[in-house]
Image (spheres, helix red, strand yellow):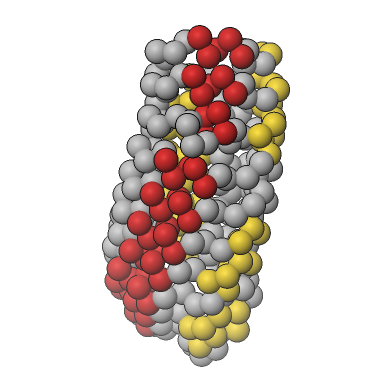
Amino acid sequence: MVGQIPPEIGVFFAMTSYISFFNAQSGPLPSTLGYILPLETFDVESNNLDGPLFQPEYAGPDGLKEIVNFRASLNNFVGTIPAEIGQWTKTQNLWFADNQITGTIPTEIGSLAEMGAFLFYKNKISGTIPPEIGNLNKLTWIDCEENQIVGTLPEEFYSNLELEEVILKSNSISGTVSSKVGDLSKLGTFWVSFNQLSGTIPSTFGNLANLQELELQSNRLTGTIPSEFGTMGSIDFISLESNLLTGKIPTE
């Protein structure tokens, strides 16, 4: 499918799904999407779409409220994430990776309590990860690789006990990795490489029986490698290079 999404799409006021991924659609999203109040799934991944991603007509105070899946990765969208995103309380998948989104993550993101996957890697998002991220108790997958995130990873982040995949690499995140990481018992992937993390590696990583991939390289970590690494029975890959670690590799 090629061409633009026509503004006349707004006449389909009973439509619940618009799915057009891996096509060659171009141009901006029509603001008339805001007329389709029952819309639950909007998937335009991997096209050539551009213009503002979150427009007030569908992502503002009077915008859509039934959205469950909003997938717009791999396009050329611009703009910021509006505070009104907090009204999308039924959203389970919010994907807009590999675009040119700027601005910060609004604190209202914490209202998306049903969200399972939050993917916004390869954008230009700055600022910090807000503490309200800890309200996403159904979150299993977060990926914000290659943005401009700064500040520390809030302690509230580790309250998301359903997390399975955490990818925060290639930002400017500082501070330490909390010992609470050991509470994330379902965690399979933890990539925080190429940041500015400091402090020691928590021994509580040893609690993570399901962890398969651990990337901590290219930070400012100090101390030794915890002997508890030997209890991570599912681990396939560990990367620790380009830090300030000392001591021996534990025999465990």
Residue at the spot x=66%, y=49% of the render? 102
Which quadrant is the C terminus positioned in?
bottom left
Q: Furthest-front residue in view?
A: 62
Q: Nearer the viewer, residue 252 or 25?
A: 25
When asked about the image quadrant of residue 155, the answer is bottom left
Name the quadrant containing residue 69: top left
- Residue 153, x across and y down, in percent: 49, 68
Q: Which residue is drawn at 40% across and 32% down?
A: 65
Say if residue 48 shows up in the picture: yes
Above/below status of 33 relative to 247: above
Left or right side of 198 for 135 = left
Above-or-below relation of 120 to 52:
below
Residue 150: where, in percent of width, then height?
61, 66
Report the residue that reaches farthest toward the bottom: 247
The residue lying at 33 percent from left, 64 percent from top is 159
Q: Which of 69 and 212 is in front in this view?
A: 69
Image quarter (top left, top right, bottom left or bottom right) of the N terminus? top right
Residue at the spot 41% in from the left edge and 64% down from the top edge: 157
- Asked whether, in this view, residue 89 is left or right of residue 51, the answer is left
Q: In the rendering, at what x and y percent does residue 23 appear?
A: 61, 19
Res. 43 visible in picture: no
Q: In this view, does 167 lie above or below 238?
A: above
Residue 79: x and y in percent read 66, 41
